[in-house]
Image: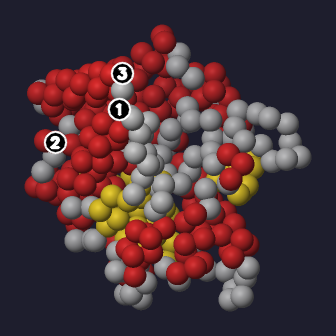
Amino acid sequence: MGRRRKTTLSHRMEYCTARVLQALICVGPAGIARETGAFLGAVAFSIVRIRRAVTMDHLRRALGNEFCEKELVRIARESYRSFGRMTFEYARFPRLTPRRIGKTVSLVGAEHLDRALEKGKGAILVAGHLGNWEYLATLPTMGYSVTFLVGEQHNMLVDGLMNKMRAKFGGEIVPLTGSLKGVFRALRSNRVVVMLSDQDAGKRGTFVEFFGRQASTPYGSGRLAAATGAALLPGMVVGRGRGRHEIVVCPAIEPPPDGTPSDEAAHFYTQAYTREFERLVRSDPEQYFWMHKRWKTRPPDESAGS
């Protein structure tokens, strides 16, 4: 179980505000909600300029050799619009039914998941912040037993609200804090363990190459795969326009040779899935969460950067 935090008056006010906003977003048609979110995202980029400098720096470093400055600005703006759109879509989860999911969300690469589960050791689906990643919560409606490994919010009331929406479709929620027993139990039960693993991991991460630059990356999924023999599969959720989404599951990462030390095996898996993430992001850079300080932590032999 995760740590219990004290609930303050500020937390209660934040929670009430979130519930009111969610109720308002759920009132109108889905299309209007999506476009309102996209509009507010554009405002955040062009007028409020929240982390605009960080976003542009990341895009120049990652894609500057492939796109001109004008195109990079367009990609950045669309990234903000995508984030605004996904935020409003996520707020509308209470109105999302299995029937609607069947019409708007498709699974590409189901055969890779099925092949992994045939071994009876479970599967680890490691995903990134592309498109509307929260739609991974719909996997149980497609016939899979799923355990979601999630980070905890500082506000436990908001944390509970978010996890309630994630569990709406039948998935099990396990917090990152103190999660090992729950995760091992899930894999022994041949479940799909889903986790997001593409953000800066600080000094506790392992450094792998992402867009030609060393990035501190969580390696827990690699350790799990090495320790349990469960297949590790990279994946993303890609928006296809007009409220349609594809959960894209890539083939399982080929494991390192037998006898590889655990630390080396974890690094091997982490670099392999990060390489797949880069390929997917290059295909749809407008949908990636570029405003996160992905390269904030630098290797010991480098100076600090963002």
Q: Considering only order in the chain, which callout, 2 or 3, is on the residue closer to the N terminus?
A: 3
Q: Position of residue 120 (x, y in %)?
A: 39, 87
- Label 3 – label 1 distance at C-alpha: 8 Å
Colour scheme: secondary structure
| Residue annotated with mark 2 | 94
Q: Which image quarter is the N terminus in?
A: bottom left
Under circle 3, the secondary element is helix
Q: Which image quarter is the C terminus in?
A: top right
* Residue pictured at 52% horizontal, 81% vertical: 228
Under circle 2, the secondary element is helix
Q: Is residue 277 left or right of residue 235?
A: right
| Residue annotated with mark 3 | 10
Q: The residue under label 2 is which amino acid type?
A: Pro
Q: Is residue 272 visible?
A: no
Q: Quadrant of residue 241?
A: top left
- Label 2 – label 1 distance at C-alpha: 24 Å
Which numbered marker is on residue 246?
Answer: none
* Residue pictured at 13% horizontal, 41% vertical: 95
Q: Position of residue 89 (x, y in %)?
A: 27, 37
* Residue pictured at 45% horizontal, 40% vertical: 287
Characterize the local packing of mark 1: few (<14), some (14-19) or many (20 or more) Cα atoms within 10 angstroms: few
